[in-house]
Image (tube, grey):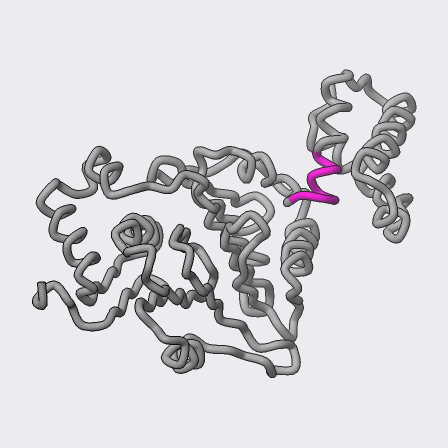
């Protein structure tokens, strides 16, 4: 019996070479899937070893994931229990679940496939990644944050880092239940938030800075105007009077860059009540002393 990866490599090149890129754009995903399914059936009939119906379905899904998703790592993207996906090369794929980093048994076909997926990701967010612009830091359509680094900057091959967007909005009460803070800490932070006291939240990657900031934002009154400034938008605020600003990297021509400093200067002209900058909260002086 043939392995999935062996057959995928054998079929992938033939099918992808036969697909017309312009035709794919004019077809629905269902129509493309039907064409790939037909091609897989034809190739399977002439393959040197038998291929099961289950494997053929798996091959079709893998090709659809590569054309319309994130290729081999799409199952990790679809897994809601996974928070981070790290690709260090074709055979080095890691993921984080419940705060623990583990190595996946997922493999890319080769470095060219990793680079192809990286370029697809960049194209979907209106960016380019090539030798002249070897890094990309952007936000995917679902809100997930992605960072891409390719050679020559990445010495060992294309690296992709994805911080997945969390659908669940965690509150301070949840953080208490998780053991992340006690009731006294929660009470202090909630009072500080209501009183507009300046708060600095810092920590390492994945330590929960954005989660805590989102939780504290629940204590901001709905009659306040809020401006958020981020490198890649991750905050989920629910107040109605909200303006979200995001920095912009330089284009290939090294023009059009917008820094956090630029956005802070602009925000000061926006009748600013609260300013969120990544993991930093800067507010007007406390009014609790007046009460």
Please name whichever residue, 93 or 228, is drawn nearer the observer in this view of the structure: 228
Q: Which residue is drawn at 86% across and 43% down?
A: 27
- Magenta span includes 117: no
Q: In this view, does 159 lie to the left or right of 39?
A: left
* Quadrant location, the N terminus: top right
The location of residue 20, given as percent across then percent down, is 90, 49
Q: Residue at x 48, y 46 (%)?
A: 164
Number of marks in picture: 0
- Magenta span includes 65: yes
Quarter-of-image position of residue 285: bottom left
Q: Residue at x 79, y 38 (%)?
A: 29
The location of residue 221, given as percent across then percent down, is 28, 56
**Would residue 155 be seen by someone viewing this image from the given angle?**
no
Q: Give the range drawn in magenta.
A: 62-69
Relative to 212, does residue 73 appear above or below in the rendering? above
Main structural element of the magenta stretch: helix, strand or loop? helix
Relative to 67, does residue 241 appear above or below in the rendering? below
The location of residue 145, given as percent across then percent down, is 50, 54
Q: Is residue 93 left or right of residue 123?
A: left
Q: Residue at x 47, y 68 (%)?
A: 245
Please name whichever residue, 126 or 47, is drawn nearer the observer in this view of the structure: 126
Quarter-of-image position of residue 48: top right
Q: In this view, does 266 lie to the left or right of 23?
A: left
The location of residue 74, given as percent across then percent down, is 60, 39
**Would residue 44 be seen by someone viewing this image from the given angle?**
yes
* Quadrant location, the C terminus: bottom left
């Amino acid at each position: 019996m043939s392995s999935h990866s062996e057959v995928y490599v054998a079929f992938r090149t033939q099918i992808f070479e036969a697909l017309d890129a312009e035709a794919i754009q004019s077809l629905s995903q269902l129509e493309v899937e039907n064409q790939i399914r037909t091609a897989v059936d034809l190739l399977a009939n002439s393959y040197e070893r038998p291929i099961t119906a289950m494997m053929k379905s798996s091959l079709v899904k893998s090709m659809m994931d590569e054309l319309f998703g994130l290729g081999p790592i799409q199952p990790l993207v679809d897994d809601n229990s996974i928070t981070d996906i790290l690709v260090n090369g074709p055979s080095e794929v890691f993921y984080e679940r419940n705060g623990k980093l583990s190595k996946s048994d997922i493999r890319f076909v080769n470095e060219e496939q990793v680079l192809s997926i990286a370029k697809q990701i960049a194209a979907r967010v209106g960016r380019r990644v090539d030798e002249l612009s070897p890094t990309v830091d952007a936000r995917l359509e679902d809100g997930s944050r992605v960072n891409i680094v390719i050679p020559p900057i990445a010495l060992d091959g294309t690296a992709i880092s994805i911080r997945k967007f969390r659908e669940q909005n965690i509150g301070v009460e949840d953080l208490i239940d998780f053991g992340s803070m006690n009731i006294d800490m929660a009470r202090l932070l909630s009072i500080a938030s209501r009183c507009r006291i300046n708060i600095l939240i810092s920590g390492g990657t994945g330590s929960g800075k954005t989660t805590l900031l989102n939780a504290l934002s629940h204590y901001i009154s709905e009659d306040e105007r809020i401006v958020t400034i981020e490198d890649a938008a991750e905050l989920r605020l629910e107040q109605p009077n909200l303006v979200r600003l995001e920095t912009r990297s330089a284009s290939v021509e090294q023009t059009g860059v917008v820094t956090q400093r630029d956005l802070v200067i602009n925000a000061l002209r926006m009748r600013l009540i609260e300013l969120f900058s990544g993991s930093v909260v800067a507010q007007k002086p406390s009014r609790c002393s007046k009460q």
